[in-house]
Image: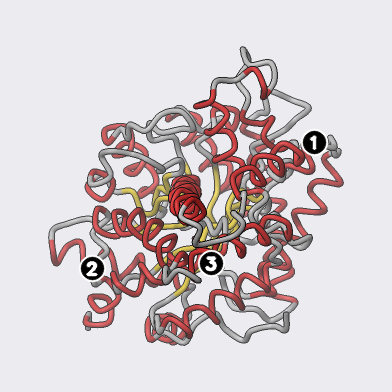
Amino acid sequence: MSPVKKIDDSLIRKNAEKEGKPIIEYIMDRLQILSHKENTGFTLFAACPNSYNVLVAGIRSAKRANAPLLYAATLNQVDTDGGYTGWTQNDLIKIIRQESDKIGYQGPNIVGVDHGGPWAKDLQTIEKWDLEKSMAWIKKSFEAAVAAGYDLIHVDPTIDIFSRNISIQTVANRTLELIAHTEKYRINNSKPPLSYEVGTEEVHGGLADLNTFRKFLELLSQGLKEKNLAYVWPIFIVAKVGTDLHTTEFDPAVAKRVSDIAKEYGSYIKGHYTDFVQNLNQYPSAGIGAANVGPEFIVAEYQAYKELEAIEQKLYQQGKITHTSNLNLGLQKAVLDSGRWKKWMQEDEKDFQSLSPQRKDWIVMTSSRYILAQPQIQYYINRLYKNLQSNGLSPREHIWSKIEAVMDKYFKEFNLIGLNQKILDLP
């Protein structure tokens, strides 16, 4: 795809440019004013664009909410090699712009790298790349993100497949190396300032306790000064706030403590693993600046496909279609062939066939994000669409509405409804 000049022409982005600020920093400054004015907190909503349908549903939901939407794209999803979506960084920007224009959304689209660091990309872990090769790839990925017009880069060198006990000093050093490289590339190529996010909620990253959390920030601050990069300070810091892959209980007390520490340094906490969390409305009051959501959307999309297949089966039994799509069987085969489902196996699980039907379905559902863009799966999906459309149904609308229902929840609970206009109305 040819390059796009800018991801959006929103008034909020134009105002940020007039002030010479990255758009995220401009919005966060505005939110502080609004928080004092309305005596309430706000948490920006970041969605992982893990499929085309998720991307479209996000734009539709953002338009309805009249609120900004962040896209947190992992390098497994979107990268120079196309990722599992088939999109490069430039592709993602162009598709978001095209779909926003088509839908009529005129607010800001904010795009960022999520978990950018050595071995955060599955391929590097599977093939056991060494540090030098892994870091070189990540640097090229960051360059592509800057060139495409990304607004945020999450620098996350907290994984080391050769060392289970990576030191916080090493995490800081690698963070500084990646930021310095990205800034050099940005300046040399006359690209506008962008925002950074650092850290992780993962225990192996070492930011799970408050003392280490503060030490990391001190090391980062000192290191940036030494590299003459004091002007670069991360807008977001990721920290453990009670949620992880298997826990959906947000801890507002812990979140408040790390938020207060982050504020001392001029940053905001970004929550990860926000999927399926029940007490979402406590994020804003705890001071969480933004929160990432991803797998929950693929669950909604997968379940929507199953509902559509059930309708398709009834149509087949009624003689209204001649062939079924067999999408679910195709998904399962493609997931197993990919091998990427193995990362979700627990220690006491031996192989796929020995799992319960419920567990098999969960693994296929969770892993379906990796193969939805494959040509063979797209063939099954298109056949499903045609079968339903020939009987007067709108399958795409059904899928989008299912995903949007999940997204609408985040816009509401994070106090984001009407936020675009509120920001524009500020003096």
Residue 68 place in picture, x, y as percent: 37, 70
State the residue at coordinates (30%, 74%).
66
Give the residue type that dot 2 points to.
Ile
Residue 111: which numbered mark, if any? 3
- Disc 3 to disc 2, C-alpha distance: 24 Å
Q: Which of pointers 3 and 1 indicates the residue nearer the eye?
A: 1
Residue 388 place in picture, x, y as percent: 49, 64
Q: Which of marks 3 and 2 is nearer the N terminus?
A: 2
Residue, disc 1: 126
Disc 3, SS? strand
- Disc 3 to disc 1, C-alpha distance: 27 Å
Q: In this view, does 351 lie to the left or right of 403?
A: right
Report crowding for label 3: few under 14, some 14 to 19, many 20 or more residues within 10 A (C-alpha): many
Residue at the far front in the pictured view: 319
Q: Which of pointers 3 and 2 indicates the residue nearer the eye?
A: 3
Disc 1, SS? helix
- Label 1–label 2 contact, CB within 8 A: no
State the residue at coordinates (59%, 59%).
322
Whether residue 152 is visible here, answered yes or no, is: no
Q: Which of pointers 1 and 2 indicates the residue nearer the eye?
A: 1
In the rendered view of the protein, which quadrant contains the N terminus? bottom right
Whether residue 203 is visible here, answered yes or no, is: yes
Q: Earlier in the sequence, mark 3 or mark 1?
A: 3
- Disc 1 to disc 2, C-alpha distance: 46 Å
Report crowding for label 1: few under 14, some 14 to 19, many 20 or more residues within 10 A (C-alpha): few
In the rendered view of the protein, which quadrant contains the C terminus? bottom left
Q: In this view, does 124 lie to the left or right of 422?
A: right
Residue 284 place in picture, x, y as percent: 26, 50
Report crowding for label 2: few under 14, some 14 to 19, many 20 or more residues within 10 A (C-alpha): some
Disc 2, SS? helix
Which is more toward the observer, 214 or 23?
Answer: 23
